[in-house]
Image (tube, rainbow, N blue to C red):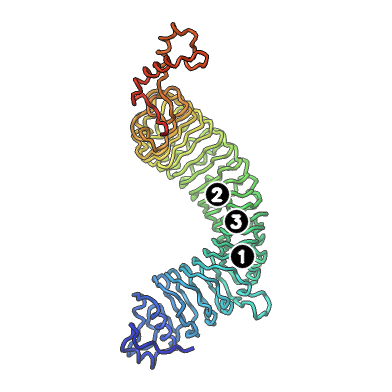
Amino acid sequence: MLVGCLPCNSRYYGALLPLLCQGSSPEAKALLRWKETLSPQPILDSWAIQAQNQSPCSWRGITCDSLGSVIAINLSYTGLAGTLEKLDLAAFPNLQRLDLNANNLTGIIPQDIGVLLKLQFLDLSTNSLHGTLPLSIANLTKVYELDVSRNNITGTLDPRLFPDGTNNPRTGNCTRLSVLRLNENHLSGTIPSSIGKLTNLTDVRFHINNLNCTVPPEFGNLSSLVVLHLAENNFVGELPPEVCKGGKLVNFSAAHNSFTGLIPRSLRNCSTLYRVRIEYNQLRGYADQDFGVYPNLTYIDFSHNRVQGQLSAKWGACKNLQQLKMAGNSISSHIPGEIFQLRQLEVLDLSYNQISGKIPSQIENAIRLFQLNLGGNKLTGIIPEEIGKLSNLVDLDLSMNMLFGPIPNQIEDCSKLQSLNLSNNHLNGTIPYQIGNLASLQEFLDLSYNSFSGEIPAGLGKLENLVSLNLSHNNLSGHITEFLGGMLSLSNINLSYNHLEGPVPKSGIFNSSVLPSDLRNNKDLCGNIQVGILCFRNKQESAVSRHSSSTTKRNNPFSIWSFDGQIVYKDIIEATNNFDSDGCVGEGAV
C-alpha cells in the first residue's frame, strides 16, 4: 500500500515536499511519515529527502538491496523514543530485518506485523511495549529469531501462534524459528505444546513471567536446544526428562518455580552444560547419581530442593567450575578434598544439609574462593589453620556446626573478609586479637553461642567499618574495652550472657538510645545498659549490712513478710547518690 504525500506544513521537509511527493519511494515516504509522528531526535537527522537523492538507502539504520529496496531497519541502542503506531509496515515488502532493541519505544506491537512476509529477524526487546502478542506473527514463515523480551507484554501464548504439526491454516507456520525470547514480560497461562513441534529451536527463554501449569513434555523433542530458561514463573509438575536429549544444552534454568518429581535424567550425561540453575523447587534426586562430570561447567545451583545422597569426589573433575551451590537439601557424608582442588572455584555453598566430618585441609588449594558457606551442618573437628591461605575470602560462614577448639590465628591472613560467622559451635579459648586486624570486616562479626573465655580483645576496636558485633552467650569476662565505643560504624552490639563486669563505655553505640545494644545477663556491669534496671548492687549490700542489727529478721529487703519501705527507700537513695544520672543504667518509657 502506497502512502500519500505529507502535509505541506511538515516541519521537516519544507520546500522539498514537492520532490518527496513526485519521486521518492513508498519506503522513504513511510519512514518520513513515521518520523513526523515522533518527537525530534538527532538519530533521525539523516532521514531527509535531498534534491539529488531521494532514496533512503543512505539514511542512518537503513540498509537496501542492490535494487534500492529496504531490507533492514536497525536502530538498536540509539535511544529511539515513540511508538510504532504510524509505521506503515506494508510499505516494506522486502524487509528481512527489523531491529529496534534497547530503546524507549512505547505502545503496542503493530497488529499488522504479519505483513512482513520476508522478515527473518525481529528484535523489539528492551523497550516499554505493552499489549498482547499479535496473532499475525504466525504469518512470519521465514522468521528465525523472534525477540520481544524485557517489555510489558501481557496476555497468554495463543496456540495459534505456533504450528501444530498439521497443515491447519488457522495455526502458525514459523517452522524456521530458532530463537524465541519472550522473557521478562507479564505473560500468563500455559506454554502451548505446539512449541515442541519447532524442532529448529536452539534458544528458548520464558523466564520471569507469570506462566503456570506444566511444561509440555514435547520440549523433550527439541533436540537442538542450546539455551532453555524457565526460571521465575509459576510452573508445577515435572521437568521434561529429556531436556538434554540432543546433548547440546549449554545454559539451563528452571529456578524459583514449584517443580516436583525427579531431576531430569538427561542432565547426567549432558557434558555440554555450562550453566545450570534449578534452585528453589521441590525436585528429588541424588547429588552423587544425577549429576555427571561437566568439563565446561562454570555455575550450578540446585539449592533448596529435596536432593539426597552424598558429595561426590567427581565434582573435582569439573575443572572450570566457579560457583557450586547446593544449600538447603539433605545431602550427607563428608566434604571430599577434591572439591577444594578446583582452582577456579569462587563460591561454595553447602549450607543447611547433613554434611559431617572435618573440614579438609585441602581447603588451602581453593585460593580463588571469596564466599564459603558451610553453616547449618554437622561438621566436627577444628577450624583448619590452612583457611588462612584463602586470601580472597570475603564471606565466611561456619555457623551452626559442632566445631571445637580455638579460632586459628591465621584467620588474620583472610584480609578481605567482610563478614565472619562462627556462631553456634563449640569453639573455645580466647578470641584471638588477630581478628582485630581484619580491617575489611564491615557486615558482621558473629561469634555467639560458643565457649570463648577471657577478655574481649581491645584490638576489636580497630574494626572501624564493622556494623554488627555479636559475642553473646559465651564465657567472656573482664571489662568492656573502651575501644568498642570508638567503633563509629557499629549499629548493633550484643554482649549478653557472659561474665562481663565494671563500667560500660560512655561513647559510641553505648551512648545511644536509638541503636540497639544488648548487655543483659552479665556479672556486674554499671553504666548505660539498655535493660531498664538500676546499678546499685554493691552499695545496696553495704547499706543493708548496716541495718542488719536492727532488722535481724529482714534477710531479703524486698520480702513481703519483712518489707520496710522506708528503709529500702533510704538504701536506694544512698546507692544511687540521690538518683544521680551517673548511676542510671536505662531509661523507662514515658
Residue 102: horizontal and vertical position, in percent?
A: 44, 68
User: Which mark is nearer the camera, 3 or 2?
Assistant: 3
Q: Which mark is residue 189?
A: 1
Query: Is residue 59 rendered to the left or right of residue 220?
Result: left
- Within 10 Å of the Cα at label 1, are there few (<14), some (14-19), or many (20+) other Cα atoms? some
Quadrant of the rendered image containing residue 60: bottom left
| Residue with the mark numbered 2 | 325
Outermost residue toward the bottom in this view = 22
Looking at the picture, tell me which residue is in the foreground, 278 or 320: 278
Q: Could you tell me which secondary element the residue under label 1 belongs to?
A: strand
* Alpha-carbon span between mark 1 and mark 2: 31 Å
* Alpha-carbon span between mark 3 and mark 2: 17 Å
**Above/below status of 497 relative to 487:** above
Looking at the picture, tell me which residue is in the foreground, 309 or 351: 351
Q: Could you tell me which secondary element the residue under label 2 belongs to?
A: strand
Residue 336: horizontal and vertical position, in percent?
A: 58, 43
| Residue with the mark numbered 3 | 257
Task: Please identify the quadrant where the C terminus is shown.
Answer: top left
